[in-house]
Amino acid sequence: MKLLKYRIMLLGLASGFLLLATNSFIRRSIVESSQAVTGTSFDIARIRTNWRTARIELSGVQAADPARSDRNLFEADRVVLDVNPSALLRRRFLVERSQVQGIRVGTPRSAPPDTHTKTKNDTATKLSRGFADRGMQWFDILVNEIGRGKSLSLESVSQSQAMCDKWPEQCRELIAESATLQAQLATMEQEIRQAGDNPLRNLNPYQSAATTLDEISKQIIEIRGEIDRQQQQLLLDQEQVCTTIRNEKVQLTTECQLPNLDGEALGKYLLADEVAGQVDSIVEWLRWGRQFIPALYEHAVPGSNRGQNVIFAGCRPQPDILVKTLVLSGGGGNAGEKFTIEGTLTNLSNRPAINNLPTELVVQTTGAVQTAIHAVMDARGEAPKDRIFINCPRWIQAERQWGNPEQLAFIASGGESKVSILIDIQNNSQLKGEVVIRQGTIMVTPRLNDRISVQPLPTLLSEACKKINHLDVTVKLSGSLDFPKWELRSNFGNELAQHLQQTFQDALTQQRLASVDRDQQEAQVAVDALVAQISTQHATIAKQLDDGSDQLQSIHDHIAERVRQNDGVVQPDSPLREVYRR
Amino acid sequence: MPATQASDVRHAIERSTNLQKTMANGIVRDVLLTERTPHGIALAISIGIMIGILPKANLVVALFVLLLFVMRCNLIGGLISILVATLCAPNFDGFLHAIGKSVLTFPWFQGIYRMLFSLPLIPWTGLDNTVVVGGTIIGILQFFPTYLLVRRLGENQLVSWQMTHEDPVPE
């Protein structure tokens, strides 16, 4: 009897110890199962179990944010679970109604740093990478065009240059020829004068002068002809330069067309990172949920580590854990403004695939952020279906940056936005949905890298950006959870493209025309000056030729006069003739 | 601190340590090391094997443990046999599962099972698990042969002990 007493005492002690360890056991079970389900660190500061009322109270509940280990995904002050004792006797953890009080979202993490979080695939950059180059090509072209405008080579300038090189040379040749003629005339005149007035005594100079006179006379005629020809050619060249200038203006107006900026591509390029981040985050959450709780979507009855639990004929499998209604209440903050959270989570179970009803979450936030969330996770049937609808008519957006700061970026002002998300997941992982973001008032400021910050680019960008005053973004989701596809449409890209195209086109045309005008004017002035200069020189040569002709005539007359005197001497009735006759 | 006070503290610690040792010795001697008869050892080993081969988190195991504690049997023998059987049991899970499954899916018993499992506490027995049912059946079936075999071996050992020692085996 003494032995039995001792043993019963030992058994009692062991049972008492087990009872005392129940809280630790329940806490560990909840933490481990939550961590297994959420894949993130889960902490419970305190747990209290009341066996008489079958109530479990958890306090200081924290779930780490999978994206940031120093923040909580959510935090709850108190979770009260009223367990159905009758169901508990039948090995079912049935909670008819429970409450989660003091929910706070995105709070700093006071528990030890998260070590459980599984790394999410960062597909945001992967999704947006393809857009970046396409959008930037246009700006590269633009910068090149603006740079090119400064060093444009014009045909008219080349022609003007060629004229300036050619005509003075030709004119110099004429001047040289004219000078040679004058020198010849001077020499001849001197020889004639030296020969004296009697040609009979110096016949030779007179004979050679007569021959030379003819040659010089011919050369003068030739030079005159050349001057006329050059005058005509000069005018023709001048006319050609003028024609080229006119053609160039027409040609530049048509040629100076920027390639069409693809608004869609620009929008994708600029917004892809931001939108991809949000979309990717949503998809990642969904995928993450499906990844970590695949067993919830299976219909097979789970067994323990050993053996298999048999469902008897006529019995319907039921989940071991079922929370019929979980009332949520709490608050949070967004961009420094507070909001309150109220909602209910119904039919939450560890085996939704075999539960009668789908799990449904209805959450409403009021205050600074007004959001309605309605999520239905229906794991029943062959193909589980999830549907999530989030409507946030007043979301405070912070200032953000779009584009690549190394090249061209835009700073978008913060403000109130309307966000609406509807996502359907069918046939296990087929994704279909739409994300709509609308910011009623927005101010966009461009930020150019110094490398491409060439005036007037920054000013023009600012002007184009000022014309955009709202933002509409629509993202269509498709594909699967593992390989999501999405198509982005926004007014921003199209409007910015339109304004940029127009502004840049005008500016580029003006810049080109101004540059061309300047060059052409210079060319025109140079040609006019050349024509004037050459004409003057031609006139001078002509004058010299006239003088030469006069001189030539004078020599000719002089010779003729002398030769006529000789003729008089030898006339038939002259005494000299009689002398020669004798 | 004066020398007398230090001595008192030392004596108090020694007394406390001696008391703990006495209690531990008492528990080991009076609770665990009792019933060293062939019957006590055989009973403990038979119950220990029954417990050892079963998955542990269920009421059947709790009942068998209670049985082990209330029966006049050798607890050390029982605990050692539980440990050994627990280590060996997973090797026989396939066999236990087959037996349990054939019993649990037997059509004639479905109504009874259904009725039983609608009662409170019965689901906690884990008797809807194939290995629990198979283990329970094998445990019960092995009980008497194991008991008889171990008892016979124990008695033979006892006879040989008495033949080689003059003093009787201490109770």
Image (cartoon, rainbow, N blue to C red):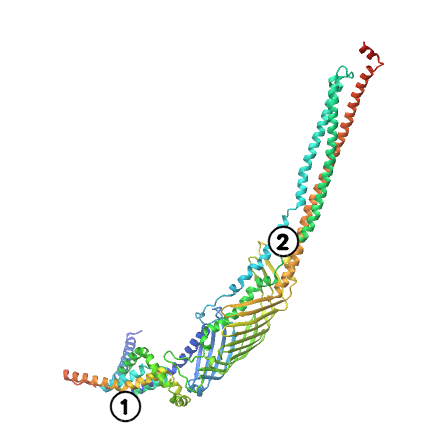
Does dot 2 land on a helix, a strand or a loop?
loop
Give the mark, 2 or 1, whose residue is nearer the N terminus. 1
User: Residue A148 in the image: x percent, y percent?
Assistant: 62, 50
The image position of residue A332, as x and y in percent, is: 54, 74
Residue wearing tag 1:
A1
Residue type (three-letter) at the residue carrying disc 1: Met
In percent of the image, x 77 and y 27: which residue is there?
A549
For label 1, the SS is loop
- The residue closer to the viewer here, A28 or A221, is A221
The picture quadrant where one finds residue A161 is top right
* A10 to the left or right of A110: left
Q: Is residue A132 above or below residue B97?
A: above
On what subunit does the disc labeled 2 rest? Answer: A
Residue A345 shown left or right of residue A578 in the figure: left
The CA span between labels 2 and 1 is 105 Å
Crowding at mark 1 (Cα within 10 Å: few <14, some 14-19, many 20+):
few
Q: Visible in this render: residue A284?
A: yes
Residue at the extreme right of the image, as rendered = A573
